[in-house]
Image (cartoon, helix red, strand yellow):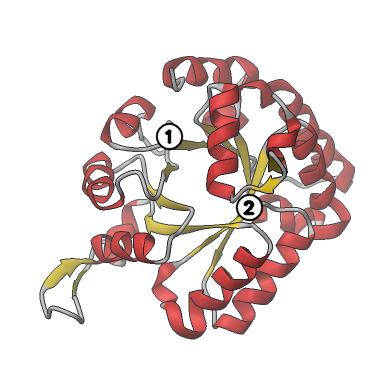
């Protein structure tokens, strides 16, 4: 694809949501690779870097983006190792999302984001439980200034998510009871988030949340395969992008695993 899509169209800077849409359309792909390797007793950092490079080389034609988590940041360091991987992903014409699950006071959230953006990340995932004032607001402000994206956790893919995202809360403006995840979906729209994470393991929740988000906020669904989620079912329920980790990373033939998923979930 044309790498200029990572930067501009007709001279104007693109927002993250539009950038990833353009790349997804160009690559006919909904797949976001979760570049998460299991814990390893490594003899050198270079082993892990080589492993990441090798996997990317095999699967990048089937992707629209890559998501990086602490699986790489902790052993490699942000600027010493991960930044080089981010640069290589950009060289493939793909975007990079940092799965930081930002969840602190506003000043700290802003600094966290600024460091990741300085390392080249295009978007960051955050937790809406922290609220707007002195919570998410500084994160959104620094992200918008740098044309970066903010994706909000709306319902996670693991079983215990029901204890937080599935609890019933009172809507302050109406006094009515509402599931927490639906309140978060409303906030996704109100904050003009660039995406909402909703687990593929709960397609009925994807459908409910999609009813609120419509086309304003795309849904990103993790939990495909290893956690029991179905890519096809998630897409039918309203998912736009599929976050896939172990199903590809742990496969005997990652390229073939990625190709099969890509073929099943192509945009057209």
- Residues marked 2 and 1 touching at CB (< 8 Å): no
Quadrant the C terminus occupies: top left
Which residue is drawn at the image coordinates 81% and 54% (left, top)? 76
Judged left or right of residue 251, residue 173 is left
Please tell me how crowded label 2 is: few (under 14), some (14-19), or many (20+) other residues with Cα within 10 Å: some
Q: How many labels sit on residues?
A: 2
Judged left or right of residue 172, residue 231 is right
Q: CA distance from mark 2 to mark 1?
A: 17 Å
Which residue is drawn at the image coordinates 60% and 41% (left, top)? 19
Judged left or right of residue 248, residue 54 is right
Q: Position of residue 72 (x, y in %)?
A: 72, 50
Judged left or right of residue 123, residue 169 is left
Whether 59 is drawn above or below 94: the answer is above
Q: Position of residue 10 (x, y in %)?
A: 69, 39
Residue most extreme to the left: 176
Which residue is drawn at the image coordinates 45% and 34% (left, top)? 226
- Which of the 4 image quarters holds residue 189? bottom left
Q: Which residue is mark 1?
A: 224
Which residue is drawn at the image coordinates 30% and 46% (left, top)? 214
Whether 259 is drawn above or below 208: the answer is above
Quadrant the N terminus occupies: top right
Of 40 and 104, the residue lying toward us = 104
Q: Position of residue 183 (x, y in %)?
A: 26, 66
Q: Is residue 197 visible?
A: yes
Of 203 and 122, the residue lying toward us = 122
- Which of the 4 image quarters holds residue 112? bottom right
Callout 2: SS: loop
Q: Which residue is mark 2?
A: 69
């Amino acid at each position: 694809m044309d790498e200029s899509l990572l930067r501009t169209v007709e001279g104007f800077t693109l927002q993250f949501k539009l950038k990833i849409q353009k790349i997804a359309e160009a690559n006919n792909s909904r797949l976001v690779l979760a570049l998460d390797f299991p814990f390893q007793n490594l003899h050198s950092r270079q082993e892990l870097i080589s492993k990441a490079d090798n996997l990317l080389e095999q699967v990048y034609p089937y992707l629209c983006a890559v998501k990086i988590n602490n699986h790489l940041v902790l052993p490699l360091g942000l600027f010493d190792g991960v930044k080089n991987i981010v640069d290589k992903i950009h060289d493939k014409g793909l975007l990079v999302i940092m799965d930081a699950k930002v969840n602190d006071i506003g000043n700290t959230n802003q600094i966290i984001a600024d460091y990741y953006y300085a390392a080249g990340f295009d978007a960051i995932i955050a937790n809406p439980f922290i609220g707007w004032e002195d919570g998410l607001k500084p994160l959104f402000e620094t992200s918008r200034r740098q044309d970066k994206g903010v994706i909000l956790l709306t319902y996670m893919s693991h079983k215990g998510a029901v204890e937080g995202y599935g609890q019933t809360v009172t809507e302050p403006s109406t006094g009515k009871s509402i599931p927490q995840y639906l309140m978060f979906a409303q906030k996704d729209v109100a904050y003009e988030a660039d995406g909402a994470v909703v687990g593929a393991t709960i397609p009925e929740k994807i459908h409910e949340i999609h009813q609120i988000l419509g086309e304003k906020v795309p849904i990103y669904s993790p939990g495909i395969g290893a956690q029991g989620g179905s890519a096809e079912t998630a897409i039918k329920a309203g998912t736009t992008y599929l976050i896939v980790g172990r199903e590809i990373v742990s496969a005997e033939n990652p390229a073939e695993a990625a190709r099969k998923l890509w073929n099943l979930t192509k945009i057209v």
